[in-house]
Image (cartoon, rainbow, N blue to C red):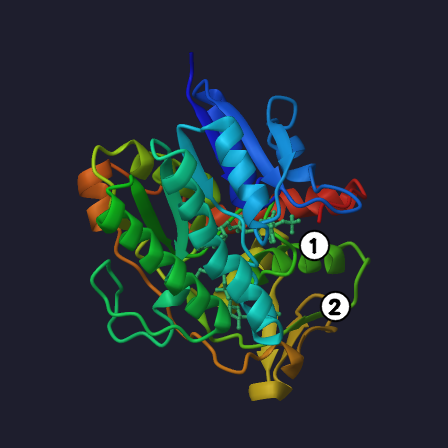
Amino acid sequence: MGKTAFITGIAGQDGAYLAKLLLDKGYRVIGGARRSSHIVTWRLEELGALADTEIVDLELGEMLNIYRILEKYQPDELYNLGAQSFVAASFEQPLYTADIDAMAVTRLLEAIRTVSPQTRYYQASTSEMFGKVVETPQTENTPFYPRSPYGVAKLYGHWMTINYREAYGLHTSSGILFNHESPVRGENFVTRKISLHLSQIKHGMRDVLELGNLDARRDWGFAGDYVEGMWRMVQAEKPDDYVLATGEAHSIREFIKYTAQALGMAIEWRGKGPDEIGIDVKTNKTIIQINPKYYRPAEVEHLIGVAEKAREKLGWTPSTNFRELVEMMTIADERRVVENRVCG
Ligand code: NAP
Ligand code: G4F
């Protein structure tokens, strides 16, 4: 019999890629999704993982819901990917973010400790915990300095994961993952917003792309590579914490440049700060503007990670570079726009 894995946040980007990876490895995959008027299934469908994934109701705010799931399924592995994962929203909803991104980790770990202690646990930690970075590049040993309610909540979950490993001997690992993207990334995140909106502009379905800070730099990798790293952490004999990153950082401006190139467009920048605009060189129209509503109360300016420990101990390396990632996302979004398909 194959192993059973439970994935929280099955409806999200990483949930879909991980479900596909585990199904291909012969796992029984059970995914937790929030009960609402409809469950988001397009990502699983697009990756060909919907038919074989068992979806059950899971609200990470509900202790007994979590407890009953652990008691019933006794999974070999649990991947906690569910979260309020949008950094900007965490400034408006700090308490909700703390409940789902911090407290729910303790709910899961308590349920594992009580009714399913053999379950191996993966915690989706984040490079946002480095925030206002105290050293560059960042490794597992870099001190944390979170800059958003999201980063603070995730840091609590990270330390709880370590604490349950040390206190109770549970197999709990934490992946400190730098930004990872894909054609099924949520539309609010800056990469997908750019690939989708510029595709719509090219095909006359939108006039302007509105953005915030164009100078922020991120270490962007491909989600498909990163879920492989999660799985490798859980297979390791000893639980531990690992950075997954590409080791390259790029600005939002560069992401725009390469997206435009993939669409056969070119952008010319004029002006400064909130008055900066991006002009389509072919049509001479303003197609990019700054809207200060997208500025954050506290910004993370520059993240770049070193995944040397994951390479050495897990044999993990990313397979997709920045240019390939941008092209993959842009090609997928332009096709959706041309075919008039909504994926978001
Ligand atoms: P995502 O697309 O936003 O997926 C998160 C999932 O969590 C969504 O399906 C969401 O459900 C679910 N969720 C939210 N609140 C919930 C609740 N109260 N109860 C149950 N489920 C809930 O995020 P992702 O990009 O796949 O990221 C996966 C995990 O990795 C997250 O924990 C994120 O914080 C972390 N992370 C992501 C990155 C990255 O760059 N992608 C980097 C580092 C860490 P709905 O579909 O109903 O909204
Ligand atoms: O795409 P973002 O919203 O991602 P962010 O904040 O880096 O968070 C993502 O990565 C984290 C890992 O480091 C995850 F933990 C987290 O769950 C999430 O997946 O923003 C990236 C950058 C920011 O500096 C933001 O200020 O893009 C800048 N930006 C500029 N204009 C914008 C926009 N971000 C968004 N979402 N929308 C804009 O219009």
Q: Residue at x 75, y 56 (%)?
A: 200
Q: Can residue 97 be seen in this view?
A: yes
Q: In this view, does 304 lie to the left or right of 142?
A: right
Work out which residue is located at the far left of the displayed protein and give it: 312
* Crowd band around label 2 with a 10 angstrom C-alpha radius: few (<14), some (14–19), many (20+): few
On residue 283, the disc is 2
Classify residue 122 by image quadrant.
Answer: top left
Q: Can residue 244 be seen in this view?
A: no
Q: Which residue is drawn at 81% across and 44% down?
A: 340
Judge depth for marks 2 and 1 and give the one in front. Answer: 1
Mark 2 lies on a secondary structure that is: loop
Spot occupied by residue 84 in the image (x, y as percentages of width and height): 57, 59
- According to the picture, the residue beneath numbered tag 1 turns out to be 199
Which of 249/144 is in front? 144
Relative to 287, is 222 above or below?
above
Spot occupied by residue 261 in the image (x, y as percentages of width and height): 57, 56
Spot occupied by residue 173 in the image (x, y as percentages of width and height): 31, 45
Relative to 36, is 192 above or below?
below
Q: Type of residue at label 1?
A: Ser
Spot occupied by residue 4 in the image (x, y as percentages of width and height): 46, 24
* Crowd band around label 1 with a 10 angstrom C-alpha radius: few (<14), some (14–19), many (20+): many
CB at disc 1 and ligand 2 closer than 8 Å: no
